[in-house]
Amino acid sequence: MAKTREIKKRIKAVANIRRITKTMQMIATSKFARAQQAATAGKPYTETLFDLVQQLAGAMGSEVSHPLLGSVKPAPGAKELTLVITSDRGLCGPYNGSVLRTAMNFFKKNDAAKGGVIELVGKKGAGFFKFAGINVARQHSQFGDKPTYENVQQLAEEYTRMFIAGKISSVRVIYMKFLSTSRQAPAVVQLLPFQTDNLGAKKSEAAKGPNQIFEFAPNAQELLGAILPAAVKALLFQAFNDAVVSEHVARMVAMKSATDAAGKMGKLYTRKFNRARQAQITTELTEIISGAAALK
């Protein structure tokens, strides 16, 4: 009797867990749909800015010069800055682990980055870096799972001012890049000095076509000065959007796996309960029959 009671408690506990994970899966699916819309809606704008920067740089040729492109040498002692984007909440499968492993591999190969300024987004990376003995200069908590363009713009402008002033020599972002619903990959992107080959695939496709000649008004240098800061902001905002949508995908998949596992475990315990109950009934019937036979 005690065995069947214990199994019934486990069946109830597994059913409660399954309801929780199913609810979290539905919430993650809903958030993923909104985040995916935001991430995909901003990509055409980002790609167009990159295309304009490439055309301007191509038109100017060797005369291209702008502080954000690295034409100004950093001050002596300027350090590299690395921004690592993780999540605030867990239960999202290998999401944080993949980003943090990529960051650690990058730091192992780049001593300047490891000894430079490291900033963090998300609570899940704080404990990891503390255990690894890596000093985090600043942890951003204003973004959450709904980063606004205003907050990202302020951060991008701060990085831009520091880079132009020569306080930092470069800015890199480590995050989870959203490629498709079934594929996300951790990426290390250089934000400053700005690189026009961040969309290398698009550039290589454009290079196959005929060479085009443009006339710019105002001149290319002025246009480049106006477009480059916007491109830096757009690239950083796209990184945040990709990170958020990748987090929701990872949590959605993890909660679906947990729900399926809880369902299988519930069926397993139900079978065990039925067998234990059947054995208990058989034992009780045997005792009754044996008692009746003894009275004859």
Image (cartoon, helix red, strand yellow):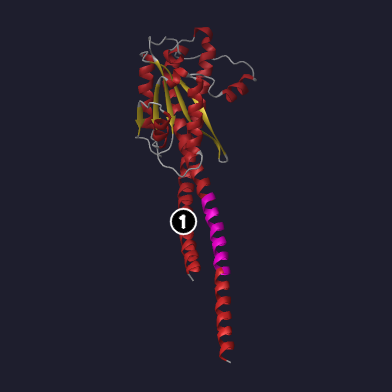
Left or right: 266, with 128 as reference point: right
Q: Is residue 116 above or below residue 293?
A: above
Q: Is residue 140 above or below residue 251?
A: above
Farthest top residue in view? 63
At which x and y percent is residue 203?
A: 58, 22
Left or right: 242, with 161 as reference point: right
Most common secondary structure along the magenta stretch: helix
Farthest bottom residue in view? 296
Q: Nearer the viewer, residue 287 or 277?
A: 287
Pointer 1 residue: 17
Left or right: 111, with 280 as reference point: left
Q: Is residue 116 magenta?
A: no
User: Residue 288: which quarter of the image?
Assistant: bottom right
Q: Is residue 267 magenta?
A: yes
Q: Nearer the viewer, residue 215 or 42?
A: 42
Answer whether residue 46 is visible to the viewer in this image: no
Answer whether residue 246 is visible to the viewer in this image: yes
At which x and y percent is residue 210?
A: 64, 17
At which x and y percent is residue 110?
A: 49, 19
For image coordinates 53% across by 9% down, the residue present is 61
Crowd band around label 1 with a 10 angstrom C-alpha radius: few (<14), some (14–19), many (20+): some
Q: Nearer the viewer, residue 13 or 278?
A: 278
User: Of the residues shown, which amino acid type is indicated by label 1?
Assistant: Ile
Q: Name the element at disc 1.
A: helix
The mark total stands at 1
User: Residue 136: which quarter of the image?
Assistant: top left
Q: Is residue 243 above or below residue 170?
A: below
Q: Nearer the viewer, residue 116 or 43?
A: 116
At which x and y percent is residue 124?
A: 41, 37
Q: Which residues are magenta?
A: 257-275
